[in-house]
């Protein structure tokens, strides 16, 4: 993932990630020590390490997401708060953050809003039944430019892995430009972000 993170300072997240990696290292050392014990089953230990790795990956994604957002919007905390609330309520969401590239050539325009970003406004857009909820919100700097935008869907296939329309749209757009797209799954409530055609899991901390 290519982007400068020189000026972001999210030390608490970074410290927590360091703690998780140290804990994983200790668990792996314990597993290695148990290898000489013939009667010991390591499957549970390995499953625990796998779970810890997934947690560390999600936390790492959250750290880098904040770093990537920081240069392009001062409202990253409001965006993170809204994503957290939407996830808790299992309300599907698709939020496009414009970075350097112009996005109009890739997006079918929706409803203009031109409103300053706030968490309540972002969350209200994605309420089920809202005329704006079925589509993507477009964010530029500290403003919500529009809602109900339609994004191009990726043509890639993922074998047996099934991706919903929101995730396919996030991948499709970021294959064409440098936008960052946030996704909340309506089915599971899980959150992710997409850059350069790749989805990364998110672990949104309680605001």
Image: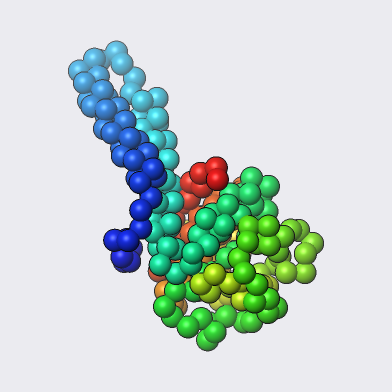
Relative depth, front residue between 57 and 164: 57
Q: Among all residues in the image, which is located at the extreme right?
A: 129
- Residue displayed at 65% across by 72% down: 115
Q: Indicate whether 56 appears above or below 107.
A: above
Relative depth, front residue between 130 and 167: 130
- Where residue 136 sits: x, y (%)? 62, 69
- Where residue 194 sits: x, y (%)? 46, 63
Relative depth, front residue between 47 and 193: 193
Quadrant (top left, top right, bottom left, bottom right) of the C terminus: top right
Q: Is residue 135 left or right of residue 154?
A: right
- Residue displayed at 79% across by 62% down: 129
- Residue displayed at 40% across by 30% down: 48
Q: Indicate whether 76 appears above or below 48.
A: below
- Where residue 13 sits: x, y (%)? 39, 45
- Residue displayed at 54% across by 69% down: 142
In the rendered image, which quarter is residue 59 located in?
A: top left
Q: Indicate whether 22 appears above or below 121.
A: above
In the rendered image, which quarter is residue 43 located in?
A: top left
In the rendered image, which quarter is residue 100 located in?
A: bottom left
Q: Is residue 41 left or right of residue 158?
A: left
Residue 44 seen anywhere in this rendered image of the structure: yes
Residue 156 seen anywhere in this rendered image of the structure: no
């Amino acid at each position: 993932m290519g982007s400068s993170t020189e000026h972001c300072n999210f030390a608490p997240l970074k410290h927590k990630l360091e703690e998780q990696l140290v804990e994983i290292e200790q668990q792996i050392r314990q597993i290695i020590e148990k290898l000489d014990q013939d009667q010991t089953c390591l499957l549970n230990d390995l499953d625990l390490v796998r779970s810890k790795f997934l947690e560390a990956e999600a936390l790492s994604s959250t750290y880098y997401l904040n770093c990537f957002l920081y240069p392009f919007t001062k409202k990253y905390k409001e965006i993170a708060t809204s994503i957290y609330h939407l996830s808790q309520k299992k309300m599907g969401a698709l939020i496009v953050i414009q970075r350097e590239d112009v996005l109009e050539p890739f997006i079918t325009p929706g409803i203009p809003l031109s409103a300053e970003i706030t968490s309540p406004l972002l969350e209200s857009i994605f309420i089920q039944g809202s005329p704006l909820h079925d589509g993507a919100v477009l964010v530029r700097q500290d403003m919500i430019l529009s809602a109900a935008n339609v994004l191009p869907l990726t043509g890639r296939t993922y074998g047996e892995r099934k991706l919903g329309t929101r995730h396919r749209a996030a991948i499709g757009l970021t294959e064409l430009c440098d936008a960052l797209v946030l996704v909340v799954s309506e089915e599971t409530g899980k959150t992710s972000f997409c850059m350069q055609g790749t989805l990364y899991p998110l672990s949104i901390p309680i605001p």
